Amino acid sequence: MALNPQDIARIAHLARLQLSAPEGERMLAQINQFFDIVEKMKAVDTAGIEPLSHPVAAVQDIALRLRDDVANEPDQREANQRSAPSVERGLFLVPKVIE
């Protein structure tokens, strides 16, 4: 996928940018270089390759420092909802804004 000067002009217009002709040409070259890199990455066969949990895992074994997913804060729902104008079954009630 390659962009042309008209695409750059449209993108600049949408972004509310004023690009001079040299700036537009430079942006066109840079964006097309980016798309070239993306195309090269898409061309790589990754079948059978396991995803990494961390980028460093490609070069060394690492242990992720993950903690157990447990609640460690006290339940203060009732105290937090005391000042609410309307509550039902532990939920804040708000006026309907979408029809």
Image: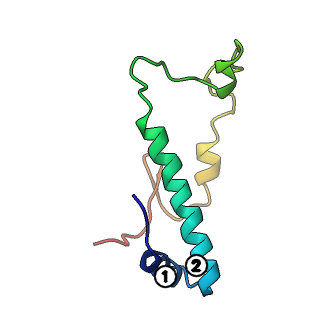
Residue 6 figure quarter: bottom left
Which type of secondary structure does the marked residue at label 2 adopt? helix
Who's the residue at 44% across and 60% down the image?
93
Placement of 89 over or under 50, stated as above or below: below
Count up the numbered dots: 2
Who's the residue at 69% across and 33% down the image?
73
* Residue 67 showing in the rendered view: no
Who's the residue at 41% across and 37% down the image?
43
Between residues 33 and 62, which one lies in front from this camera angle?
Answer: 33
Give how far across and how far down residue 56 sits, in percent. Answer: 70, 24
Q: How many C-alpha atoms fall within 10 Å of the one at disc 1: few (<14), some, or many (≥20)?
A: some
Which disc number belongs to residue 69?
none
Q: Which residue is mark 1?
A: 9
Q: How is the image coloured?
A: rainbow
Which disc number belongs to residue 24?
2
Amino acid type shown at disc 1: Ala
Amino acid type shown at disc 2: Gly
Give how far across and how far down residue 80 sits, in percent. Answer: 63, 51
Q: How many C-alpha atoms fall within 10 Å of the one at disc 2: few (<14), some, or many (≥20)?
A: some
* Residue 8 showing in the rendered view: yes
